[in-house]
Image (cartoon, rainbow, N blue to C red):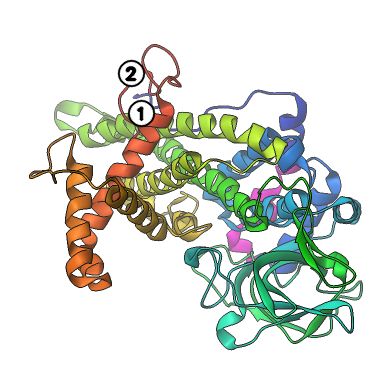
Amino acid sequence: MHTSSAAAPAAPAGGWEASFRAHVADLPETLAPQRSPSHAVAAGRMRKLVQSGLVRHTDVRDDPERFFGAHAVLSELATRIGPGFGIRFTVQFNLFAGTIVATGEAGHLELLERMQQRGQLGCFALTERLAGVNSGLVVETVAEWDAQRACFVLHTPHDGAAKNWISQGTVADYAVVVADLRVGGKRRGPHAFVMQIRGESGALARGVSLGDMGDKTIGNDLDNAWIRFDRVELPRGALLSRYAAVSAEGNYATRPGAGGVANIDMIGQRLYTGRIVIAESAVIFAQSLFGAAQAYSDAKRVWAPGGAQPTLSDVPQLAALYREAGARLLRLRELLRALRGVFGPLLKEGTVPPASLVNVVAAAKVRCIETSIELCHRLKQEVGSFALMAGSGFERIDYLQCCKFAEGDSRILMQKMARDRVAAFRKQQPQQQPQAPGAAGEEAWLCGRLLSALASQGQAGWDGAWEDVYRLADLLVQRYMDEFMEGRVAGPGGADGGGGGSIV
């Protein structure tokens, strides 16, 4: 039998984590995909979790490790139940509640407490058909201050501005809606508003219309909604106003003590937190899949000459893959633990992370998910018919596809990294462009090539050099992670416990 570090490490018994694990122990039965659980069943289970108080709406600020830890536990179940419930969890506690905690005031926090007591659900309405995370948080839904009626008027001006793929949107009681705020005819950019979208009877608020996005290849226990607003009136207190507010007289102003923090920066911080938990979820999914496959292959005898009965795990290429995956996934878990450790204090203090840390988070999301996809695909090729069996976990592998585009598509993040690096390179105006992509100079060499492409052909030149763009992004992903982990390796053997090396 071969040993492998690919399986997720066992969690310590006792305390809060044991209580949380006990609370969610029914999920593989309750939300088993073969049962085709309805949105109502899955939402009801989330309401029960919310009302239990095991995770508080304010934990993303007050106890970030509890939030991270709860999501990690749910991720361990993903090969059995798919992504739906884990996504509900991040929507409820990070995107919806986290945005209110970060940008709201006392009255908004009181709303969160009431929702917790009642087991009410929220959704986060940011993304639109033509705008959202991928467009740099540009939104076209409008919230205009109406001075005569002393209220905001929330409106979807055209089809492209309809909110799109809003997880938990068809069952939510409340929504955080990100809209372009306009006061006195002047645009103030994206701001977050909290509103009740359905009443106690379940009827939608006046002016709100929504529908389900339809069946998916995975996670159909999770509802994803499109939402439109037809001149919905919101009270002045609906604006999450810790950093900017509109006075009763209709004057817009940033709040004293905001310290230069932009409202959109604190909304964006939810996406950074989300990227960390999504990256960790992908790695845990891969570890769980490898663990299940190895348990099978350790017990699976195969024919060999001379009467020997080796196991499938003894096949050289599979044994090598187990060792490789174990080391690579463990290094990524160490990276994510370090990121959680650095991000926790920022969440508690309400501090915007520096650009360098934002880059590391983006790099971690890209590398964790791409590595998980690669390793799981390779594993599928080596375990024969086991990969086709219901219950093996391979039928949930589109979970990783969900991770790839959630909270910022991996390709978009890589494009942004490359563009930012080329822009910085342009400002440096080096005396001489490197003539060859040597080991230490490939980044600069690629930047020079991309600058030349932009100078000669503009956007068409950039698009035509897409291979250079993504090669540059790959180099940046590696460098950002390696620089972050310098001095943070776990023990004398490095983060992989076996001689150190880069995060891969």
Q: Residue at x 61, y 53 (%)?
A: 265
Q: Residues within 10 Å of mark 1 (few under 14, many from 20)?
A: many
Which residue bears the numbered disc 2? 498
Instruction: Report the amino acid beneath label 2.
Output: Gly
As drawn, 163 above or below 273: below
Decide if residue 277 is in sight here. Answer: yes
Q: Relative to residue 302, is residue 327 drawn left or right?
A: right
At a point 63% along the width and 51% down the height, the residue shown is 270
- Which residues fall within the magenta stretch? 22-36
Callout 2: 10 Å neighbours few (<14), some, many (20+)?
few
- Image position of 140 with respect to 13: above or below: below
> Which is nearer the N-term, disc 1 or disc 2?
1
CB atoms of marks 1 and 2 within 8 Å = yes
Is residue 350 shown in magenta?
no
- Horizontal and vertical percent position of residue 80: 56, 50
Q: Amino acid at mark 1?
A: Ala
Residue denoted by label 1: 327
Residue 23 in the magenta stretch? The answer is: yes
